[in-house]
Amino acid sequence: MAAWWESAAIYQVYPRSFQDSNGDGIGDLPGITSRLDHLVDLGVDGLWLSPIYPSPLADFGYDVADYTAVDPVYGTLADFDRLMSEAHARNLRVLMDLVPCHTSIEHPWFSEHPDWYIWAEGKNGAPPNNWRSTFGGSAWSRDPAGGPRWYMHSFYPEQPDLDWRKPEVVAAMGEVVRFWLDRGVAGFRIDAIDRLIKDDELRDDPPASVPFELPLPEEYAELEHLYSHNRPEIRAALAGLREAAGDALLVGEVYLPAAEVTPYLDSLDSAFAFELFHAPWEAEALETAIGAELDLPGTPAWALSNHDFPRLPNRYGELAVGGAAVLACTLPGLTFIYQGDEIGMANGPGADPPYDRAGRDPYRHPMQWDATANGGFTAGTPWLAVVDPAERNVEDQRNDPHSLLSLYRELLALRGELRGTPRPLSAEPGVVAFERGAHTVVVNTSGEPRTGPGGQRLRPGQAFVSGPGGTIGV
Ligand code: NOJ
Ligand code: CA
């Protein structure tokens, strides 16, 4: 029998910005529960909750200070249980965000079990080696307790990396996994999993000779992360996670081009298709990325947007948002939709001074539910300004059969009927075209009229799926 998730659509909730229930301007669990009917209306099969754990917010929840609790700003474990039962009553599955590679520096493990982390001696006052942190600077910082050694952090200094060669770490994270499974979650999106293990000899990373295939921060991209990332030993470490998770869904954030993802799929069910995520909105590049992904074992996890990168209208242009919906919803496998994409939310201005030091505030503005001043997100002052609720919001689009929201809803309703692997169809350059069983998908990625695979004239940006039941598209 096919697993429930094999063609599931999952909605990414960024809890801080989804729905505030108590007027403090910050989204929370009761707020999410109160909006579950939107997910039902949209037609998704489940939701992925970005981190809700207690966190000092150096990396907005990806610096976890307690893996088995809820940050009081989001509510309580009882609120979580209520969210679970309300989700299940609506046939929605819930995925948690598991952050196994690093903790917050304020996690008690860091002081109680320092040996669970990666430490090394410096070299004449300099860090142990040349490894870089993703967000800039050395990947090593001095012991805050004044000891002689340095600890390693793949991301911010407030996020020390756990040492996955230690069986205690594997066991502790296994308990975390079981804690949430016991509360009814259906699986996990696993953060930064390509960083799980580092070279045990701490060899220097060489300078990058060719550009990495996916976008990276400039300074980080100067090195080829041969020893600090994507080590072959990760394969064995992942088996420990799988053992704890049983047959729950595990989707990895493996930030690598498709061809390098295969080893991860020994233990993971699926990994995000970052090659497609970052492909330019041009038919040929999109087709290449889709093909590379379809060649992998396991189930693809398509996503075109998330809380880390500019929103769709900013990356692809307004003309392309309908085509992005068609593509995201008609490919086989899992598909992830980031909150707000269904109404075409664009980047906002962020905050001054910024909350996120890596500049990602603009992609995290509050969800726009209605046309009121705060978009229905909060009765208080939103933690991050609301962008343009009068121009785009759920309420208006729900009532408009030609809206982007209605398009997503129709596409998701059709999704379960689509069968088979995409078979490319030839069309004019600039047009993505493939067949899935009795359905044909056509996306004109260009800003010009084009001819489709059946000889039909396509408007700039026109995109649709057609089959026995008719045509859905823009
Ligand atoms: C990926 C998450 O999506 C991102 O928000 C975070 O900063 C890094 N992993 C580090 O946890
Ligand atoms: Ca709140």
Image (tube, rainbow, N blue to C red):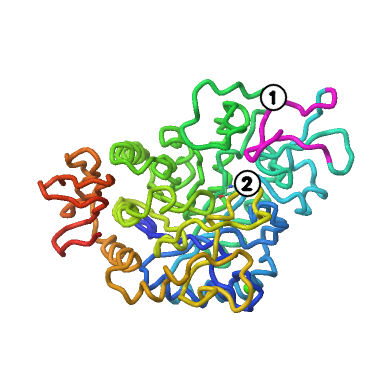
Q: Residues within 10 Å of mark 2 (few under 14, many from 20)?
A: some
Per the image, the residue denoted by label 2 is 358
Q: Residue at x 62, y 32 (%)?
A: 219
Please tell me whether residue 189 is drawn above or below residue 196 in the rendered image.
Answer: below
| Residue named by callout 1 | 201
Ligand 1 within 8 A of label 2's CB?
Answer: yes
Numbered range of the magenta stretch: 124-143
Mark 2: which amino acid? Ala
Q: Is residue 239 above or below residue 440?
A: above
- Which element carries disc 2, helix, strand or loop? loop
Select label 2 or label 1 by which is in front. 2
Whether the residue carrying mark 1 lies under 8 Å from ligand 1 is answered with no
Q: Please tell me the numbered disc located at residue 441.
A: none
Residue 326 image-quadrant placement: bottom left
Q: Is-magenta flag for residue 399? A: no
Q: Where residue 137 sits: x, y (%)?
A: 70, 35
